Image: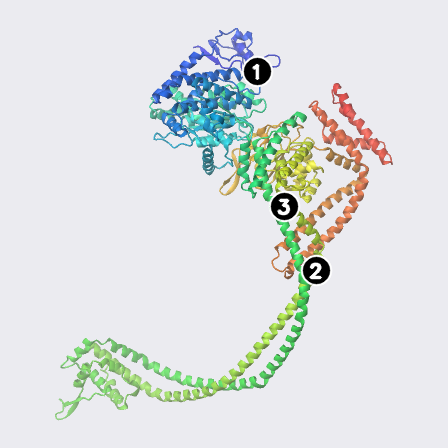
Amino acid sequence: KHAVVFVDDLNMPMKQEYGAQPPIELLRQFMDHQGWYDRDNSFRTMQDVLFVAAMGPPGGGRTAITPRYVRHFHVLALTDSSDATLKHIFSTVQGWFLTTRNFPKPVVDLKDMLVQATAEIYNTVTAQLLPTPSKSHYVFNLRDFSRVIQGVQMQNPAALAASAQQARCSLPHQHMKLWCHEVMRVFYDRLVDEEEQDWFLNTLKQTTSRFFRTDFDTLFAHLVGGGGGSGGTPTPITRSHLRRCFFGDFMSEMDENGNQPYVEILKPEAVIAKMEDLLMDFNSLTRRPMNLAMFLYAVEHIARAVRVLRQEGGHLLNVGVGGSGRQSLSRLAGFIAGMEVFQVEISRNYGVNEWREDLKSICKKAGSENKPSVFLFSDAQIKNMSFVEDVNNLLNTGEVPNMFPYDERSTIGETVRSLSKRMGRQLDTPNELWSFFVERTRANLHIVLCFSPIGDSFRNRLRQFPSIINCCTIDWYQRWPEDALEAVAHKFLKEVDIMPDMLKVIVSMCKLFHMQVIDLSKRFLEQTGRYNYVTPTSYLELIVAFTTLVGAKRTEVLGAQHRYEKGLDKLEFTARQVSVMRLELQALKPNLERKGRETETLLARITKEKANVVEPKKAQVDKEVKEADEQAQAAKAIKDECEEILAEALPALNSAISALATIKKSDIQLVQSFKNPPAAVKLVMEAVCVLLDARPTMVADPNIPGKKVADYWDASKKLLMDSRFIDRLKEYDRDNIQPRIMEKVRKEYVADPEFTPQNAAKASSAAEGLCKWVHAMNSYDRVAKVVAPKREKLKEAEASYRKVMEGLQEKQEELNKLMRELATLEARLSNSMEEKDRLEKEVEKCKMKLDRAQELISGLGGEKDRWMEAAQALRGQFSGIMGDMLLSAAVISYMGAFTAPYRDESIAAWTKACKKVGVAISPRYSLAGALAEPVRVRSWVIAGLPNDAFSIDNAIMLTNARRWPLCIDPQKQANKWIKNLEAENKLSVVKLTDPDYMRTLETSIAFGLPVLMENVGEELDACLDPLLLKQTFKQSGTVCIKLGDNTVEYSKDFRFYITTVLRNPHYLPETAVKVTLLNFMITQEGLADQLLGVVVAQEMPDLEEQRQQLVVSSAENKRKLKEIEDQILEVLSKSQGNILEDATAVQVLSEAKQISNDITQKQAVAEETQGKIDVARRGYRPCGEYNAILFFCIADLGGIDTMYQYSLSWFIGLFVRAITQSAPSDALARRLEAINSLFTYMLYANVCRSLFEKDKLLFAFLL
């Protein structure tokens, strides 16, 4: 078998300094020697191998190939297709599309003119817009030609008709507008300069007029808001007008086939509103919402991206500086197109293997699952150039060679087999299935590249990987126009409480700041060689910083003003209360004395009444009550005895009455029916008749002839016939039974052993109940005879008790009357005593409040004038907050990377501009005056911050900026200051070279500890991006951040500092937009102060040590004074009502003021001592100033050669040596002259050792 090796882009490798091309030479080795050397230095011969190569013509980044290599090839020149060929090809394609889609004939007739016009544009652009080092993307090929035709074919006849109807124009004219739009998207969007855009627009106008016989300005007259020009001439269409030309499908509803028509959108305002709605939908569905402002500029780029994503296999290259919105707008475009946007997450250990796994995942989703997807890739994610090579392959062929091993390819083949069947394609072989997978990947995978044009990387990537240009539609992100700046400002500033007129002025000033800093950055680069990039992110930072600072400052000033005014109100109230309370005290004393006399008189009267009247009467009544109680007890004893005796008979009686209740009418009728009743029944009825005193019937005695006996049966039957028989028994007067009746009953019946309820029950149930009743009457009567006499005694006892109680009641009424009179007197006495107590308390309270008032006035009276001045100053400051915070926000957002002269120049210009447009600012504005707290600044200086305005401004920007600071710190001043400042907070110091710095970061983020990353270079690790951009999100209610593969809980107390020792680093916009760049290079003023401290410490060490102690103690005293004043004002402002009634508050204020007075006295002594020390140090100041100038002489040498760099620590060490070695003298002037002379010589001698000979004279001249 023979192998064929195909080498594409053969002339891509750049020539080295002396013309060598190592890749070409390596290939030529095979041609000359039929093989290569292996890694073990053994030569490997390769047989039956052929090479086929391809290359473009030299020029535009492509080099010429050495003849020594070309001689091994048969060279074939593939000339460009002729115009006739191109026109024939694309006319045929366009004609087929128009006829098969049933377009109207007038539109079909335009196909030849459309293709010819496209060819004219393509040829003109290819000839005129040639690639240059700054415009290396000006490379055009037939893919661009085909993209125009493809874009025109995105519109079907229905969409064309709808667009024409909305625009009120003919179908051919609407088709021409679509063609113009597609031409601009392919060629116009990649242009860099406004002059080239104007040239292209004129070319397009000429081409339209020449081939379509239509005036371009008339065709797009609807883009001009005010209509045509004078005399019916249409207004010339300019670049600004074309920004309102939109075609897209995102404003259309789906048709019956599920497609959204691609139509012209005539109202850009409607597009902006639609984009805002879509942005809200996107933010509601993502963990990382985007806070974007929708304006015309943003909508333009979103519409361009959506257009590319709508095309099958469409890829996009966004070119713009970092912070211009490339990635955010691309994500939103992917969401609008209904596609999942995938972006790799770069971590510390992210490498080629992880990259390939991510690529496999996205390719499977696009190819196997047939899901349209977007792969978003930025240049910040290029950790390895092989990443770009793989992307280049995906763009060109839809696959990365050898990325999928054979086992995975087999799995993919089985997965896509069912997909191919659903699409009506019968595929069997593995090669067919794999080709189908690649085909679907190319169709569904849309790659969106976001690259920056800054630096050489962009040009090199385009040269090395041509598919980035050939296979992508290019969208060049221009500088934000003024309407974009204005729209963003209005969106974010509408939440701030600003009057509409002032809002317009603020917006205009924000635009002015942005544009001036762009010009200043150019001048800064020209004059100092330092780069500073102004991006849209800088402008957003300005707006956000302004809104934050204004809100915070308003709250702070109003709060402080309120506290001072409340304190003054309390002091004024206290002063007024003194005279009032003195009058009250005078009025209260007579009343108190009178009330005391009344109380004593009333007390004597009550005592007398009690002893002479009430007490004797009460004793008599108590005695009689006792006697009545004794009689009541006796009656009760008799009653209890009666009831006890009755308790024996009552149960039987109740049982008998209950038995009577059980006798039914039928039972009685049964007894009645007996003609010859049973003996038991007859016996029971006789007993009943006897008790009821019923007369018997006298009948003959059957045993004794002639004798008559009493027969009760007839009487019994009469009783039984009585309907109230049972009721009579129940109501029987058992307490008054005649003795004769009871005697007879007991003798004849109860004594009879046969007279029992049990025997009676055998005869009749009624007889049983009657028998029980008779027995019960017998028992009750026996008991009643015993109880009757006792009841008589009970009646007598109760009568006697009632009589006693009647007499007792009269005497109790007399006693109650006396007691009521006594209670009235006692109530009067109680009221009088309460009134007396109240008056005594009021007098005491008034005295106490008077004492507190005098104490408060004596303690805080001296503060009144100062507080009035402070409140007045705050009222004046409030009126200037808007301007001060606007300037402060501008300084924080834009000025960090500039040196002191440029900052001062900008602040002066901005101050003048603000005053000119009527924005109120402080008379002598400074960043420190607007945002600094004196106590905090002193603590910074003690921690090692250079004591000059430039360094203090840097510290203010560091603490107020929203982004983490990156300090340009060649002298390590910031590094030293941060370490001292955060030493107590467990600061962690890391470097990018540390193997486990990410673990340290994760721990510090979770626990809210500060981290200092030092010695960074010009590029930051991509895995820091989530932290730098603060991409936090909520997970289970907790704020988290994702670093690489780890999700870490994010503490709001975490602080992150970054420093670099590079003297003039070049941070590209991609890095600059993520951090707040701060130029911490030392100033001459700050260095002079440091050198003064060094020379005094050497010459007068005790004095310098005492000064350092005084500085610390003075700062601590002032901090305590501020805290005490805040405490006093806090107590006064929070006090409710009359503060003189709040003993705790007055005590706290008195103690605080006492401490304040003590500290003030100490501070006065310290300041007096400090003044004496300053006088002694002032004589050495010329030495510090002179030698500070020398340091900046050697610092400037870095501009000649980067090797000429000298550290501040080395400089100070040399200065100390010069002080110790210089000639001593008692005369200060001579001593300083000796130090300066020796140090100048030592500096010259030491520096000259490191200079080239040609630079020594220049250094001597500088000195």
Q: Position of residue 948 (x, y in %)?
A: 71, 37
Q: Position of residue 278 (x, y in %)?
A: 45, 35
In this view, the mark in front (1 or 2)? 2
Q: Which quarter of the image is occupied by the C terminus?
A: top right
**Mark identifier at residue 1121:** none
Q: Position of residue 550 (x, y in %)?
A: 60, 42
Give the residue pinned by disc 2. 855
| Number of residues whose C-alpha sits closer than 10 Å to that of mark 1, classed few (under 14), some (14–19) or many (20 or more) | some
Q: Label 2 to label 3, Cα distance in Å? A: 34 Å
Question: In which image quadrant can residue 463 be found?
Answer: top right
Question: In which image quadrant can residue 384 be found?
Answer: top right
Say above or below: 466 vs 1221.
above
Asked if the residue under mark 2 is in contact with the one under mark 1, i.e. CB atoms within 8 Å, the reply is: no
Q: Which quarter of the image is occupied by the N terminus?
A: top left
Front residue of 203 and 828: 203
In what element is the residue under mark 1?
loop
User: Horizontally, is 1246 left or right of 1142 in the view?
Assistant: right
Q: Earlier in the sequence, mark 2 or mark 3?
A: 2
User: Horizontally, is 291 left or right of 1194 in the view?
Assistant: left
Front residue of 510 and 20: 510
In what element is the residue under mark 3?
helix
The amino acid type found where label 2 is placed reads Glu
Q: Position of residue 1233 (x, y in %)?
A: 84, 31
In this view, the mark in front (2 or 3)? 3
Q: Label 3 to label 1, Cα distance in Å? A: 63 Å
**Mark identifier at residue 878:** 3
The amino acid type found where label 1 is placed reads Met
**Mark identifier at residue 14:** 1
